[in-house]
Image: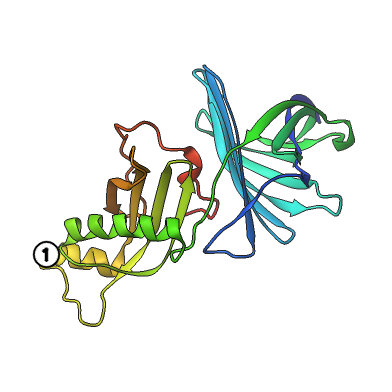
């Protein structure tokens, strides 16, 4: 077996703030980052009972690795994960452990064996040394009927009416918030007495496609929609840079594979 030294990760959920997803009430969500001048590292975790899924990305101007995390919560609180990633268009997988304490994600190093093409497993998990730290970053899911939720929905209402020509109703969906930024994502529906949009293509969008709006608070604390659109043919959303600055990465992250 070929032995290699690369980063290994560990997470034990102690003293870490977590929020609960509105769409998945039994799921805890944790977000961590380390952003330097020339590099960045993001970890997004969704924990349901003993199951864990998430995403991870890291890199600099020379190379970037990104992919999905899957695993379980061990009895000692450590997450035992497999990281399926792509780096420079090459796929790979790596066994990882993760450990979080007091709002931090501690990252270590350990020896890994290559058990197959692009498949790395920890040689000795107990010898992993934690040397790198990611800080926790905020993410909340305000309810639609909360004060913040109502303010976001009011702004989204106006954006939908401008785009479609109708006053919307909502079929589920979720609001994510981080600081002065927010994202609404979900399906719209027609109220019983509401006519379809005059434009057939827009009527089809309302009935079939998910809708997303990105918002930011202005200087007076009012939510303003910066961009809004229906999903494209692939069910994905086109991302447009905002003149207001980069939107927090955790508002767009999705560990469900959509």
Question: Which image quadrant: the N terminus?
Answer: top right
Say how the picture is coloured: rainbow
- Residue pictured at 47% horizontal, 45% vertical: 251
Q: Is residue 181 left or right of residue 240?
A: right
Residue 86 appears in view = no
Residue 108 appears at what percent x and percent y? 77, 28
Query: Which of the pair 156/221 is nearer the observer?
Result: 221
- Residue pictured at 74% horizontal, 54% vertical: 72
Q: Quadrant of residue 113?
A: top right
Q: Residues within 10 Å of mark 1 (few under 14, many from 20)?
A: few
Q: Which residue is mark 1?
A: 199
Q: Quadrant of residue 101?
A: top right
Residue 185 appears at what percent x and percent y? 39, 57
Residue furthest out toward the front: 220
Q: Is residue 24 left or right of residue 169?
A: right
- Residue pictured at 42% horizontal, 47% vertical: 182
Residue furthest out toward the bottom: 192
- Residue pictured at 15% horizontal, 68% vertical: 197
Residue 27 appears at what percent x and percent y? 63, 60
Q: Is residue 216 above or below residue 202?
A: above
Query: Which of the pair 174/66 is nearer the observer?
Result: 174
Q: Is residue 2 left or right of residue 45?
A: right
Residue 90 appears at what percent x and percent y? 54, 33
């Amino acid at each position: 077996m070929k032995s290699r030294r690369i980063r290994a990760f560990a997470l034990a959920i102690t003293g870490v703030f977590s929020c609960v997803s509105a769409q998945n009430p039994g799921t805890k969500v944790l977000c961590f980052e380390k952003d330097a001048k020339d590099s960045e590292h993001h970890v997004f975790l969704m924990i349901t009972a003993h199951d864990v899924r998430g995403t991870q990305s890291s890199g600099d101007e020379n190379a970037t690795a990104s992919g999905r995390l899957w695993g379980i919560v061990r009895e000692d609180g450590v997450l035992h994960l497999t990281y399926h990633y792509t780096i420079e268009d090459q796929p790979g997988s790596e066994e990882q452990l993760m450990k979080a304490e007091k709002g931090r994600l501690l990252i270590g190093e350990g020896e890994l064996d290559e058990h197959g093409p692009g498949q790395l497993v920890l040689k000795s998990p107990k010898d992993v040394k934690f040397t790198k730290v990611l800080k926790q970053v905020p993410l909340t899911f305000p309810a639609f009927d909360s004060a913040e939720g109502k303010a976001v929905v009011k702004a989204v209402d106006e954006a939908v009416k401008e785009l479609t020509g109708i006053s919307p109703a909502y079929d589920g969906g979720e609001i994510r918030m981080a600081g002065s930024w927010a994202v609404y994502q979900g399906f719209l529906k027609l109220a019983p007495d509401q006519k379809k949009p005059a434009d057939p293509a827009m009527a089809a969008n309302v009935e079939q496609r998910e809708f997303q709006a990105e918002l930011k608070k202005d200087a007076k604390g009012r939510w303003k929609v910066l961009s809004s659109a229906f999903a494209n043919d692939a069910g994905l959303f086109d991302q447009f840079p905002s003149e207001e600055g980069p939107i927090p990465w955790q508002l767009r992250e999705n560990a469900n594979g959509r």
